[in-house]
Amino acid sequence: MTRDEALFEFLLRMGDNTLILGHRVSEWCGHSPVLEEDIALANTALDMIGQTQLWLGLAGEVEGKGRTADNLAFLRDAWDFRNVLMVELPNGDFGQTLMRQFLYDAWSFVMTDWLKGSSDPRIAAIAEKAHKEVTYHLERSGDTVIGLGDGTEESHSRMQAALDYLYPYCGEMFEKDKSDELLAEAGIAPDPTELRPEYDDIVGRVLAEATLAIPGGSYVHKGGRNGRMHTEHLGHLLTSMQWLQRAYPGAAW
Amino acid sequence: MYAQMIKTASNGIKPREEMSEEERAFQDKIDNDIKIEPRDWMPEDYRRTLIRQIGQHAHSEVVGQLPEGNWITRAPTLERKAILLAKVQDEAGHGLYLYSAAETLGVSRDELIELLHEGKMKYSSIFNYPTLNWADIGAVGWLVDGAAIVNQVALQRTSYGPYARAMVRICKEESFHARQGYDAIRAMAFGTPEQKRQAQDALNRLWFPALMMFGPSDAESTHSEQSMAWKIKVKSNDELRQQFVDQTIPQIEYLKLDLPDPNIKWNEERGHYDFSEPDWPEFFNVIKGNGPCNVDRMKDRVAAWDDGEWVRDGLLAHARKKAARKVAAE
Ligand SMILES: [Fe+2]
Ligand SMILES: [Fe+2]
Ligand SMILES: [Fe+2]
């Protein structure tokens, strides 16, 4: 594996995470519990789609085969996607959506913080912009997790159920393979395992304030980040997301 | 826009000699284009009529998220998806300003939402039509936001200060939406034959519903007179509709799409385009709840509200606990 191949893989992982999660969040449009949340969720989705354009745009550039961000988003099949499994899971109730957002935002916050100092200036520039957005997302999703965890009995039990469901998917964000090692050696991207302590610190603090218990058990669901095995949900998501591009190949929109 | 057939809460205009002192002073302010502000005295009927109008406008912004949201997950490019998300976010923001403007009249957002869900308040008929192909998203921005702007530019001069100011802010964003919508449908009108077909289909389906947004013709519009005297309404339905038609026909021609109505023709004498009236029985049916999407739209909104109850309750409970802890610590 060359360094550019590793870099391409990494950029897909970044861009696919934001693409798929941005898509999931956008499904809430017009259906959230209160108008302020409709606005906030649309804003979060919008930021993530913007980040996708940058990550996948750079991925296409690095690949050097003339593929654009749109080509990568709309014309790959599921096995070529490199997002972690957590982001493709269905939204569930509002609590599950916000819990997932928080667990992802905390990782994204630590990741983009590191990437601001990447030895690749193109990555550092994207991370600089993304980190500002993610800082705000994390503040919001963290506050909501705290509010609902420490709210009523019902909201507490729903948030605990969401955490129990999602927590086994968190570990995948810290998996490491050959391509990560290559990039870490070059100072382009972090060794993912090294992000874990700071992540655990953020998550631990928020969940404690939310009066929620981190589930025991160490099992980790994975297979998205390396493309080995996605969930059944991704195919359905792509079916709607890619429909127009697939039905009318070559059209400009 | 999005306020149609607002029933004015009074029976005709009171002659000046029958007015009380307060009413006369109030009417004088309006006649001199002095804005009415929340703390000013106002006739109860003025207040009630405004609540209906602003509330209906706010509900329209909120329900209007649904037909556009219908395509967010299927937007054909990342750029178009981002534009659509930003637009829908703006619309929800408009809902928020408008509910705030209504609150200055002494009615809460929750009360208004409850009235909507009970079927006692309405939202614009346009949002009871479906969005069936991607060109509809372009057409909604171009025609629906376009029609809204025609009405709302007029409403920037409305007599109630908070409403007029909300309109100024909202109009800027609506103009942006209309331009982006036009750009999206232009890409299709000049695209492949299939795309062109979609653009034409969208125009044909949405043209008359867009004309209906201005409400029934002046001859049938019974509640306008008092609202005009109060400057809650600034121009008549037919005037606004004509203005919209006149500005839109050249845009259709530029797109090289077929006109959606065979009777559209420049009338030299009037200096305006002639056009067919929309199907008013259809309009009244949509208003009564028989439009293609009325039931689904309300079901969606009510479900969002009901499913969200635990979230609102949870956040409120947390805010109270936090406040109590703060007090205890002091
Ligand atoms: Fe509007
Ligand atoms: Fe709007
Ligand atoms: Fe708009």
Image (cartoon, coloured by chain):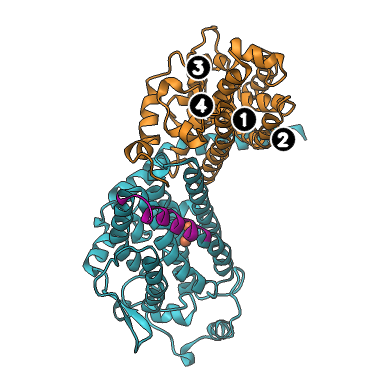
Both labels 3 and 4 in a single chain: yes
- What mark, if any, has residue A142 been given in the picture? 1
Q: Earlier in the sequence, mark 3 or mark 1?
A: 1
Spatial CA span between label 2 and label 1: 20 Å
Total labels: the figure holds 4
Identify residue type, mark 2.
Answer: Lys
Both labels 4 and 2 in a single chain: no
Chain shown cyan: that is B
Q: Earlier in the sequence, mark 1 or mark 4?
A: 1
Identify residue type, mark 4.
Answer: Glu
Spatial CA span between label 3 and label 1: 17 Å
Q: Residue A231 location, x and y as percent?
A: 41, 19
Of the two numbered discs 1 and 4 in the rendering, the one whose residue sits closer to the viewer: 1
- Chain identifier of the residue bearing label 4 in the image: A
Of the two numbered discs 2 and 3 in the rendering, the one whose residue sits closer to the viewer: 3
User: Quick check: A143 left or right of B65?
Assistant: right
Mark 2, secondary structure of its residue: helix
* Residue sitting nearer the eye, A13 or A211: A13
Instruction: Determine which residue is flagged by label 4.
Output: A153
Chain shown orange: that is A
